[in-house]
Image (cartoon, rainbow, N blue to C red):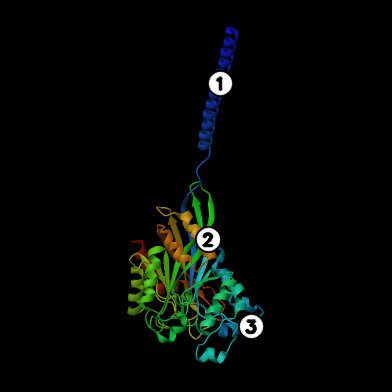
């Protein structure tokens, strides 16, 4: 009996020692795992963060390849590339995007030159769009000619632009209560003067890495050729500008005048007061002046960038406005803004609603500007103008005075 107790005690002791050994080994293993995990965490750097976004954009005036421009192109050996054939003088490769005002519907209606000359019912052929897409990122459709082929023509225009990867914004609808515009209220896209345009930006990270990203901007039209923009236009601009960096590109003003009037000044200043980053306008077919208002740029008219008018020295000239955007991180989640940009490219219809729902902090943009004079004199082919025109257009714009005002 005594032998059995000794045996049991020995077995118990061995088991106890084994258990304690296992516990010690397990504890040592856990400690080692914690040490390894901690060392791994210390060795793995945090994900790089965006410190700044940079971009260079070119805003250009009235653009159109119908009527006499189409005649010149079809008669030339260059065909549809004719009006674009000297745009390389503006160094497209230096810009992430070009944005301009397309002053014609793009449909298969062809050309009735008598109507185009007498009642100004325009059309632009769609086979020019692959050439246009080499230069233009987005087109403004909020003008008095984009609806020349009716509502179906407008929808066809948007379809062709989609197929060629060109974004668009704005509506030919005139004012809130104009009975001529009933057809443009059939759906929200036809009626809305504002839209989201996704533009490329260059991101710099805190590890000095650089990457190309997408950023959603608000772009708004203010079609006021037959009156003044309605309250619905202005309310939309205010809504967009409160949520997303927004640029207004009105289409209004007195044709062939070389300076702005008080009516346009009041409206454009109000648009700035509503929160727009800048107002960059066209329609008068001539270059007009600029001003700095509350630290923001107003361009009253860029003139004809690509148009067929040649009846005086003014109408073939334009001012292309270069906008250099600098977006710093501050409190804005720039990675999330990039995600929204990518999402907007996939689903434009719900894009602004999604941006609104996220309630992201709207980033502040520092804009710096330059201008370039262009001409299509003689051959209706747009190109960089000579130094004399560059100087003359700068004086017309009152550029130095405006830039001094922005610097204050």
Q: Say the numbered circle drawn on residue 370.
A: none
Above or below for 85 versus 245: below
Disc 1 to disc 2, C-alpha distance: 57 Å
Query: Circle 3 sits on which residue?
Result: 74
Q: Label 2's element?
A: helix
Residue extending farthest right: 77
Residue 250: percent from left, percent from top: 42, 75
Residue found at x 48% / y 54%: 335
Query: Circle 1 sits on which residue?
Result: 21
Q: Earlier in the sequence, mark 1 or mark 3?
A: 1
The residue mark sitting in front, 1 or 3, is 1
Residue found at x 43% / y 64%: 369
Inspect this view and state whether residue 317 appears: yes
Q: In the depicted view, which residue is nearer to us: 374 or 148?
A: 148
Query: Circle 2 sits on which residue?
Result: 342
The residue mark sitting in front, 2 or 3, is 2
């Amino acid at each position: 009996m005594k032998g059995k107790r000794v045996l049991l005690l020995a077995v118990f002791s061995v088991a106890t020692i084994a258990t304690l050994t296992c516990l010690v080994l397990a504890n040592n293993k856990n400690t080692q795992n914690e040490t390894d995990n901690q060392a791994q965490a210390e060795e793995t750097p945090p994900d790089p963060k965006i410190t700044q976004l940079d971009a260079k954009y070119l805003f250009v005036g009235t653009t159109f390849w119908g009527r006499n421009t189409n005649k010149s192109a079809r008669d030339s050996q260059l065909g549809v590339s004719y009006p674009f054939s000297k745009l390389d003088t503006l160094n497209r490769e230096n810009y992430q995007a070009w944005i301009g005002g397309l002053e014609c519907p793009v449909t298969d209606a062809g050309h009735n030159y008598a109507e185009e000359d007498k009642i100004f019912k325009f059309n632009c052929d769609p086979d020019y769009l692959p050439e246009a897409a080499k230069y233009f990122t987005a087109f403004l459709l909020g003008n008095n000619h984009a609806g020349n082929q009716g509502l179906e023509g407008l929808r066809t225009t948007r379809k062709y632009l989609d197929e060629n990867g060109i974004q668009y914004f704005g509506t030919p609808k005139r004012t809130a209560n104009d009975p001529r515009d009933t057809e443009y209220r059939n759906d929200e896209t036809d009626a809305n003067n504002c839209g989201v345009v996704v533009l490329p930006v260059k991101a710099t990270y805190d590890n000095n890495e650089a990457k190309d990203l997408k950023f959603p901007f608000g772009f708004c039209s203010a079609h006021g050729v037959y009156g003044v923009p309605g309250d619905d236009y202005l309310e939309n601009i205010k809504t967009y500008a409160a949520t997303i960096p927004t640029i207004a590109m009105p289409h209004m003003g007195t044709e062939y005048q070389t300076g702005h009037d008080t009516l346009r000044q009041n409206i454009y200043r109000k648009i700035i007061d509503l929160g727009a980053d800048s107002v960059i306008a066209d329609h008068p077919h001539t270059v007009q002046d600029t001003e700095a208002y509350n630290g923001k740029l107003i361009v009253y008219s860029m003139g004809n960038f690509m148009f067929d008018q040649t009846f005086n020295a003014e109408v073939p000239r334009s001012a292309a406005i270069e906008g250099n955007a600098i977006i710093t991180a501050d409190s804005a989640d720039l990675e999330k803004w990039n995600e929204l940009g990518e999402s907007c490219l996939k689903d434009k219809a719900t894009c602004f609603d999604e941006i609104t729902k996220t309630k992201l902090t709207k980033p502040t943009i520092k804009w710096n500007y330059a201008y370039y004079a262009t001409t299509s004199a003689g051959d209706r082919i747009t190109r960089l103008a000579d130094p004399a025109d560059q100087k003359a257009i700068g004086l017309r714009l009152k550029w130095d005075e405006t830039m001094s005002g922005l610097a204050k």
